[in-house]
Image: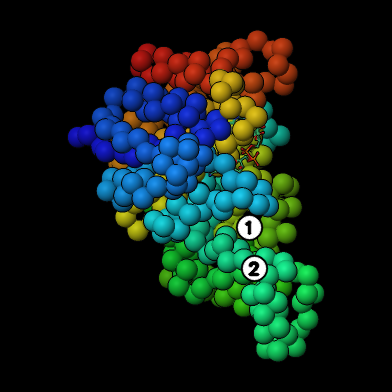
Amino acid sequence: MSHKVTLIPGDGIGPEVSAAARRCIEATGVKIDWEEALAGTEALEKTGELLPKSTIDSIKRNKVALKGPIITPIGEGFRSVNVALRQALDLYACVRPAKTYPGVRSLYKNIDLVIVRENSEDLYAGIEFEEGKSETRKLIQEIAEATKKKIRPDSGISIKPISKSGSERIVKFAFEYALEHNRKKVTIVHKANIMKFTDGLFLKTGREVAKDYAGRIAFGESIVDNMCMQLVQKPHLYDVLVLPNLYGDILSDLCAGLIGGLGIAPGANIGKDMAVFEAVHGSAPKYKGLNKVNPTAMILSGVLMLEYLKEDRAARILENAVKEVISEGKEVTYDFKPSPSESGIVGTAQMADAIIQKIKEK
Ligand code: NAD
């Protein structure tokens, strides 16, 4: 059976790593009918829109997409196309497995964690009030009247909504994921001691959900700052972590650091009946077009996509080929080596070729 999949190359290093992932996925023999769609700066240049409706429609139709990273300007300019896409399709669960493969350069061995990040709420809701604007002054005044608390008049404000229903579905997702993937424990991460009505609600709701899984999956709780230290000191104590949006984003990069860097960390954004697969890393603009960066994160996102498509055999073939190429270290990108003068360093496309060669040898 052929699967129809939307392919969004993205910008910066996106097109290079997406092309590598596409070739590796095709080498497994799985039949995929790719439908290319634009998003990001290329879409803006060609269509006048950052996230064209045709791209959203393509994902809604096909239910599955593989997406390269997309630039978001810092501080000013347009809002994140990545966040807009997740919100438009209600891809509420961001799943980011962090696993060490033999041969990666990391301070740790045998890491096997999964981040489940809430993807639709929290400070990423995009509800912001700019410093100096009349609506911001009005809000500051209303807050002063309602709470007797003073916000400095020259403040900008970002709103952090966290709902009971949003918390319930993400914690439930984490437990269901744990059951399905033979995991032992879910740890909820929060800052409920300070943000009682947002993180507090997330935690309280999570505790209720956890009761339904008692005896099947263990449940733990951790304050986010402590969790950062714990992950650096004792990562092996943890299994599946479920977090609100912002902490999930930050801890995803921390976990990428545990397993050898962003070049190796894959991800999936999952909704009720559709999913978009993408690496944890961004568009690394300074490496654009250099055929230099690591395609592994994007290829492993392809492995997650194959699993979602129930192509488990192809997923294992591809993951094993990636594993072999990394452990041999003869045709890998620069970030696998301690210095650029080491032997065995190849470009993005050549590492993909080596993975394809391993698949062919099977
Ligand atoms: P980044 O992840 O793009 O890159 C940070 C650094 O990580 C790079 O300079 C590089 O040293 C390393 N790196 C990243 N990917 C790599 C790879 N495949 N192989 C080897 N090394 C790799 O983060 P950034 O520089 O903070 O962000 C750049 C842009 O990407 C920003 O506009 C940001 O908003 C955007 N972004 C997009 C997504 C997404 O599309 N989902 C995610 C994160 C950031």
Disc 1 residue lies near ligand 1 with CB under 8 A: no
The residue at which mark 1 appears reads as 247
- The C terminus sits in image quarter: top left
Question: Residue 168 at what x, y percent from top left?
Answer: 46, 70
Which amino acid type is marked by label 1? Tyr
The residue at which mark 2 appears reads as 129
Position above or below: 352 against 3: above
- Residue furthest to the top: 343
Which amino acid type is marked by label 2? Phe
Residue closest to the eye, 266 or 181: 266
In the picture, residue 30 is in which quadrant? Answer: top left
> Colour scheme of this structure image?
rainbow
The local secondary structure at tag 1 comes to helix
Residue 152 seen in the current view: yes
The answer to the question of whether label 1 and label 2 lie on touching residues, with beta carbons closer than 8 A, is no
- The N terminus sits in image quarter: top left
Position above or below: 15 against 140: above
Q: Residue at x 73, y 47 (%)?
A: 233
Assess disc 1: are there few (<14), some (14-19) or many (≥20) residues with their C-alpha within 10 Å of its C-alpha.
some
Q: Nearer the viewer, mark 1 or mark 2?
A: 2
- Position of 156 with respect to 53 (left or right) is right
The local secondary structure at tag 2 comes to strand
Residue closest to the eye, 7 or 257: 7
Among the two numbered marks 1 and 2 on one chain, the one whose residue lies closer to the N terminus: 2
Q: Residue at x 28, y 32 (%)?
A: 32
- Position of 258 with respect to 176 (left or right) is right
In the picture, residue 328 is in which quadrant? Answer: top right
Question: Residue 175 at what x, y percent from top left?
Answer: 45, 60
> So how many labels did they put on this image?
2
Give the quadrant of ligand 1.
top right
Q: Residue at x 36, y 45 (%)?
A: 55
